[in-house]
Image (cartoon, grey):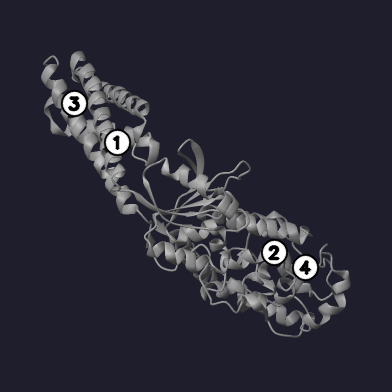
């Protein structure tokens, strides 16, 4: 398979971006559950406060008379309960031991706050103890009532999450039994692993969105050989739960949750899908515009030096393979003689890249004197800021390669063409030209895609400055 056959496919957006702004599936149900639990806890704590003051020893204190202090008490108690993860879905909200610990910690915290604020005017000892015990009793009772009522409704088929199961035939029955143990899911459909194949993936996700599916359960055997399916579910706003086998691997952004008595790897969908990517895109545009303005004198000096050094154009443009294998023209300051591309064929035998996929030659005779300096400090890449502005590139991403290199790809490597190419990337800050094996280069690109985050981009940009100044691996 070559890039030419791939490029016939309809153009799509970056793997990390949603086609449109989508809210996480099932978000309304999750918000409603949190609001109900929050209301039950607030009611329980207010009642506990009133009963403790009524039955405890009377003591003139602003903590028992003024509403601002009651508000502070509630803020501290609810804040500590939330910090313990007791409003999360699943078993978390039923962790009564953690709830007791949270309420005990809030009681101690309030005692400390009161001591620091006004040592002689908190509440009586009997009121303090009653507040602590009654808070625990009523809050835990409310949680128990909520759980019993929820289970009763779910046994009648109400408030269940619509889910879709993707698994192979031999694992189908065991996975259905495992999911049904939770009694909170409605299986909207079941399909075999072929629905996640590259050519079927978009139709599958369209069907899931149409059915209102909030979570997809996928067996590890169905997903292990299908690269970056996780991104597709993420940008569709669907939570992905990977059903385990004995040899499953852990995805970098995964969490674990018990399904029945089995730990299940979960890759949650963001609340607003694709938001991180669009923040990245806005940053790219703003940063490139600022850099173009600041570096405009540098552009002028480089242009004059190139003209004085050798005959030929100032800028060099070359066809590169970008997002979804679409060709685009990459812009660079010319660092070689004007007929460099024609001379490359005669130099192929001297290629220093071990597997011959990329062309690298340390003492390339085609490079001009000014070109050598520009390459050493990566100044030849500066015109690519224009490629960023028009949406063909990003500041950080896999490096766009020429047709010659992409034509030698294995089919498994085409995943790197599913994201915007970049001026710098993990490869560039990990040795650049010193990496002489194409497989190692690809591993770094795939590692970047799999672990991508805004924070990773920032780290790569900062590392790029260091690498450029140290001239690491540049020639």
Residue receiving disc 3: 48
Of marks 1 and 2, the one in the foreground? 1
Distance CA(mark 3)–CA(mark 2): 68 Å
Distance CA(mark 4)–CA(mark 3): 72 Å
Of marks 1 and 4, the one in the foreground? 1
Front in this rendered view, residue 236 or 281? 236
Q: Earlier in the sequence, mark 1 or mark 3?
A: 3
User: In which quadrant of the rendered view does residue 95 lie?
Assistant: top left
The residue carrying pointer 2 sits among few (fewer than 14), some (14 to 19) or many (20 or more) residues within 10 Å by Cα, namely: some
Distance CA(mark 1)–CA(mark 2): 63 Å
Distance CA(mark 1)–CA(mark 4): 60 Å
Task: Kindly check if marks 4 and 3 are in contact, taking CB atoms under 8 A apart as contact.
Answer: no
Residue receiving disc 1: 147
Above or below 249: residue 114: above
Of marks 3 and 2, the one in the foreground? 3
Q: Earlier in the sequence, mark 4 or mark 3?
A: 3
Under circle 4, the secondary element is loop
Distance CA(mark 2)–CA(mark 4): 25 Å
Residue receiving disc 2: 377
Q: Which mark is residue 70?
A: none
Residue 120 locus on image (x, y percent)? 20, 17
């Amino acid at each position: 398979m070559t890039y030419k056959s791939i490029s016939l496919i309809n153009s799509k957006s970056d793997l990390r971006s949603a086609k449109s702004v989508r809210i996480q599936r099932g978000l309304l149900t999750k918000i409603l559950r949190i609001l109900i639990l929050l209301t039950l806890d607030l009611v329980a704590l207010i009642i506990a406060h009133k009963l403790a003051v009524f039955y405890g020893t009377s003591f003139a204190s602003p903590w028992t008379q003024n509403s601002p202090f009651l508000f502070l008490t509630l803020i501290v108690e609810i804040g500590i309960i939330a910090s313990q993860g007791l409003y999360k879905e699943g078993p978390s909200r039923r962790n009564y031991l953690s709830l007791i610990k949270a309420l005990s910690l809030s009681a101690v915290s309030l005692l400390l706050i009161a001591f620091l604020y006004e040592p002689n005017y908190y509440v009586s000892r009997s009121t303090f103890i009653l507040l602590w015990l009654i808070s625990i009793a009523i809050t835990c009772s409310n949680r128990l009532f909520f759980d019993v009522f929820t289970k009763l409704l779910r046994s009648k088929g109400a408030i269940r999450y619509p889910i879709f199961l993707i698994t192979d035939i031999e694992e189908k029955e065991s996975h259905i039994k495992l999911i049904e143990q939770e009694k909170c899911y409605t299986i909207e459909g079941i399909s075999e692993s072929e629905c996640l194949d590259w050519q079927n993936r978009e139709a599958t996700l369209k069907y899931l969105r149409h059915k209102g599916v909030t979570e997809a359960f996928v067996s590890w055997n169905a997903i292990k050989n299908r690269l970056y399916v996780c991104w597709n579910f993420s940008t569709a706003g669907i939570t992905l739960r990977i059903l385990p086998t004995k040899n499953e691997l852990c995805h970098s952004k995964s969490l674990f949750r018990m399904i029945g008595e089995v730990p299940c790897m979960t890759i949650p969908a963001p609340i607003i899908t694709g938001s991180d990517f669009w923040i990245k895109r806005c940053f790219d545009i703003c940063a490139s515009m600022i850099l173009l303005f600041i570096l405009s004198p540098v552009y002028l000096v480089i242009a004059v030096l190139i003209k004085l050094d050798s005959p030929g154009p100032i800028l060099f443009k070359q066809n590169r393979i970008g997002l979804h294998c679409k060709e685009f023209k990459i812009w660079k300051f010319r660092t070689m003689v004007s007929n460099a591309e024609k001379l490359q064929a005669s130099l192929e035998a001297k290629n220093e890249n071990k597997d011959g996929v990329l062309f690298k030659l340390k003492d390339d005779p085609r490079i001009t004197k000014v070109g050598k300096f520009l390459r050493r400090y990566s100044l030849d890449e500066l015109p690519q800021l224009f490629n960023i502005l028009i949406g063909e590139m990003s500041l950080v991403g896999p490096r766009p390669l020429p047709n010659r290199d992409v034509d030698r790809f294995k089919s498994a490597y085409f995943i790197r063409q599913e994201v915007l190419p970049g001026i710098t990337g993990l490869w560039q800050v990990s040795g650049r030209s010193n990496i002489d094996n194409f497989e190692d280069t690809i591993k770094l690109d795939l590692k970047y895609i799999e672990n991508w985050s805004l924070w990773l981009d920032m780290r790569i940009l900062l590392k790029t400055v260091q690498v450029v100044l140290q001239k690491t691996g540049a020639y």
